[in-house]
Amino acid sequence: MSKTLNQDAFLIVPLYNEAAVVEDVLKNMKTKFANIVCVDDGSKDDSAAIATGCGVMVVRHPINMGQGAAIQTGIEYALQYDDAKYFVTIDSDGQHSIEEAQEMLNYLKKNNLDIVLGSRFKGQAKNISLTKKIFLWTAAKFTRLTTRVNISDAHNGLRVFNRNFAENLNIQLHDFSHASEIIHRIGEGNYKYSEYPVTITYTDYSKAKGQPMLNSVNILFDLLFNRLSK
Amino acid sequence: MILIQVILVTGFILFLWRLLTNSNSYQVRALTKIIAIIFALTAIIAIIFPETTNSLAEFLGVKRGADLLLYLLALVFIFFVLNTYIANKKLQNKIVLLSRKIAIIEANNKNKSRK
């Protein structure tokens, strides 16, 4: 692998039971990024071993703690490196495009932003179901109302942010609620943000693994509880 | 509104307040203990003089003492559930922080030995 690829950026890849696809996904990422931190969230399958075999940095949670916890672990691990100036969170199931991650990084640097969020509604969503579309639109609408952060897609795992944002993020919601928490943090911290159109590929594999929509009830409760308990 | 309704509604409002503030200040902890003591003393009186629950129930606007006990039990139970939930969340946070430290230390050690 080339050592000159994006030395200043660290890819944070939360990984949980993706043994079927993770090798291809990581190899593809390595064509664009030199620094990849894969956080295995206590997978029950061979995911962690496969990731280690791919020659990326692997951090293993001793127990399963959730995607938000995994992303925070990855950030804290990468922050140990002084040359980590930019951070990219990206899913390990291959639903995001690594080329678009690269474009988002360029966009963030060019416009001197704190964070760039991927949005499937500014781009294309392949094979998305109508119910999922309505659900995501409603979630984004709700997030816009509660945070005044103007976004079209509140639950996109592809994000690029700078070191300042990474240092101050400190994700408290350990499961899927972290996506909304990050948006809230943008609003509170007055960060310079932008959305970037991305393509999400919904394969049968990712559809089968996606989070159930009923989970939005849990996310809502977590957010309320976490905000009021501060 | 009869007296028991006032008491139960106040109880559930307190429940919501506890849910939303989630404060673990010394006031809340002291209040919890005072309520527990009053509850225990009332229970002892009720055990020794069971008829008193009937007269208390009548005074509060409930038909029977047994009904009154059931209502109060429901209130106590819901507070118990809430407190357990809060304690669990706090414990979970501690576990996440600990596990994260372990994960990062392990990963650092591995990277060192590889170099």
Image (tube, coloured by chain):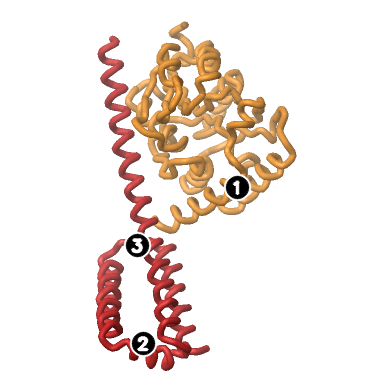
Chain colours: A orange, B red
Residue type (three-letter) at the residue carrying disc 3? Ser
Mark 1 lies on a secondary structure that is loop
Which residue type carries mark 1?
Answer: Leu
Residue at the image point whose x is 40% and y is 79% from the top: B69
**Which residue in the protein does label 3 denote?**
B23
Q: Mark 2 or 3 closer to N-term?
A: 3
Q: Residue at x 52, y 29 (%)?
A: A160
Mark 2 crowd level (few <14, some 14–19, many ≥20, 10 Å Cα): many
The residue that mark 2 highlights is B53
Q: Residue at x 63, y 45 (%)?
A: A140
The quarter of the displayed image where residue A196 is located: top right
Q: Are marks 2 and 3 on the same chain?
A: yes
Which is more toward the observer, A27 or A62?
A62
Residue occupying the point 52% across, 12% down: A27
Q: Position of residue A129 (x, y in %)?
A: 72, 36
Q: Chain of mark 3?
A: B
Number of other residues with Cα within 10 Å of mark 1, as a class: few under 14, some 14 to 19, many 20 or more = few
Q: Is residue A16 left or right of residue B46?
A: right
Q: Are marks 1 and 3 on the same chain?
A: no
Q: Residue furthest right?
A: A130
Q: Provide the chain ID for the residue under circle 2.
A: B
Name the chain under label 1: A
Q: In the picture shown, does residue A94 fall above or below A120?
A: above
Query: Which of the two discs, 1 and 2, sits closer to the camera?
Result: 2
Alpha carbons under labels 2 and 3: distance apart: 33 Å
Secondary structure found at label 3:
loop
Amino acid tagged 2: Thr
Residue A214: give its label: 1
Marks 1/3 in contact by CB < 8 Å: the verdict is no
Residue A119 at x, y percent in the picture: 63, 34
Tell me if residue A147 can be seen: yes
